[in-house]
Image (spheres, rainbow, N blue to C red):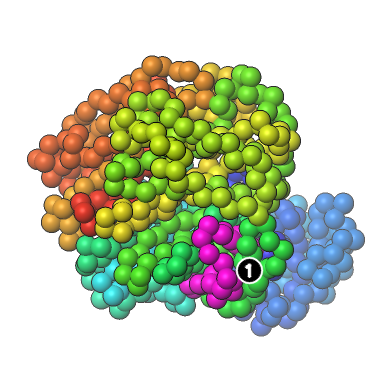
Amino acid sequence: MALKIDTFSNQVGGFSFFKAVGHPLTAEKVSVLLADLAAGGSVALYDPLGHLETFAELHDLSSLAVDTVYVQAVERVGTTVLGHIAAPVTDIGASTATALLIPAFDTGRLIAHIRHLLPAGMRLVTLDDARLPDGMLSNPRKYLDPLNFAINHGFLRDGGGRHTRLVTANYWSGYGATGMRLWLRLFDADGKVLVTWEEDLPDGPAGIVIDSAEIRARFGLDAFAGTLFIHAIGARGHDVVKYAVDTYGDAPEELSCTHDANAWPADFYAGLPSANPGERIVLWLQNAHPNTAPAGSMALNLMGGGEVRAIDRPVPGFGTISVDPADLFPDAAWPDQFELRAGKHVVRPRYEVIADNRRTRIAHVNVERTDLKGDPAIAGAMAHLGKGYILPAPVLPVARYRTVALPTPMSTGQDRLPIAALLIDADGTEIARRTLGVLDRSDSVAIDAVELMNGATLPSGYGHLELIYDFSQGGADAADGWLHGLFRYEDTESGHAADTSFGAHVFNGIMTFKGEPQSYGGPPPGLSTRLFLRLGNCMPGSQGGVDSLCHLIYPASTPWHEASETVLVLTGADGSEIACTPLAIPCGGSRLWRASEMFGADDLTAAGDGGYVLIRDTTCRLFGYHGLIRDGVSFSLDHMFGF
């Protein structure tokens, strides 16, 4: 049962109304408002902006004795809205309802237009009665301004010697934001509020760390695993809260990381792997809304498979459950992969791999697009775009690490995938290439980097993989520009592993094609880099034994500058610049490095807890992967985020 709400459109961007009515504080006020209306007799509903059905999806209106639903748009008159035949608002004078509810904010003009039509004595109620306080708004004059709802949902867990840290920076300061603060509410797995608090952010690009162990100690909490609701107040430039999540433990073997949740719940997610022998998968589902997601409202199926099996457990409002896909598909095994039918109930889920009941790693699935179909123009554009869409991922030093790639369909219309895998040395030399043909949606083909070498060697000892479109065996009508893959890394000595996943872009070319090369700061082409690398040397329990690692890749769809002009800026927790180090990466190549190799120990110590490295390049767009490492024991790896 998918929610009938608008959350995100690639043409429009994110929608604010569902965030506004689903905000925890607003949800509390709406519950009081609806209870008051239910006790007062019959209610008429007026839906001038088309928000009523979204409102009804996120809040239970069954207690209301609804008399009539009125609309403003002539084309909606006579349609069915919430089981009622919509009437024109011009008929409202004949209503016998005692109250009129308008599910909208900033309703001054809307009310002025109809006040003279209302029957005498009719009570008027709007969602302005459930607004957040003006002090929580970046733009009080326009309530649904996306910057008023710069929110996200974090996964926070503390218990059994396992902890989590959300790490980011005040990147809004780069857009002129001052006096910012975070409004934070921690929910347990049942959706119960554990604690609510605020944290002031220094002006400037200061680091931000929210540590589960510190939160648990500060507020005297028992063990928990649930959702941290994050609302950035005073935001400028970005309405998304970006962060990295580190999972660490009292035991040194516990170390992993994953990406932010993505603030827009989606219909489908993909890239969820099946378990290897000796492993167990835990899929964490976090309800993004105040209402319960009913049992059976979400389901899994094997990618490309016809059988859909429901998850027969409800998820409380703002609650969290864990699901083992093997309970639904006991015969599935790596490299089989699943599609999650999420129905817009949950933010981008995480999955956790538990190996031999000892080592764990956490990663995320990705949003599966529902608006794409094959585009033959992509094949035609290759004459101008060279390699075109490139999905780059590290190949860690082959003497110690195993690197495996798994293409993952990431569009509901992606039935075929014409693809090739390229292995490239750190110096940019292509070492090997394998055409995989045109894969069917149900195909799950894992590619081992060493096997791809077929006896060749990587002169640098490491490099990167590129997944690209390959039309040599057909499929020119199947490419949709949404090429994704899951990448798995295993330390062959310690047994520790990490998963990461991402999608392809056109990189480093002056010709543009349908929004590519993508730029996060303006129109295409995107030809610059601003990436965030958090430091781990001050992580609790690290005792100086945790280093930050980074694998920067310089993918080039067409030949670009011979080498990057990258600058690594060591930034203190207070946002101050401590040191800079230049870094040159060959075009088409990569560079694997550690913070301790680029900066002195005294400077890293001075950066403090919350310090980070800002990776800047104004000459090219780099793609990066970040992680932490305890030598010989454990490591983490995921793709980086920029701002």
Q: Which quadrant holds residue 99?
A: bottom right
Looking at the picture, how far across and down is residue 220, in whole percent? Answer: 25, 76
Task: Report the residue that reaches farthest toward the bottom.
Answer: 39
Q: Check the picture and name the quadrant holding the N terminus.
A: bottom right
Residue at image coords 68%, 61%: 305
Residue at image coords 53%, 64%: 333
Q: Which quadrant holds residue 595?
A: top left
Residue 515 falls left or right of residue 404:
right
Q: Is residue 390 above or below residue 295?
A: above
Q: Which quadrant holds residue 10?
A: top right
Residue 467 falls left or right of residue 186:
right
Residue type, mark 1 in image: Ala
Looking at the picture, how far across and down is residue 212, in whole percent? Answer: 30, 65
- Identify the magenta region: 318-343
User: Is 340 part of what is drawn in magenta?
Assistant: yes
Q: Is residue 582 above or below residue 141?
A: above
Residue 620 falls left or right of residue 98:
left
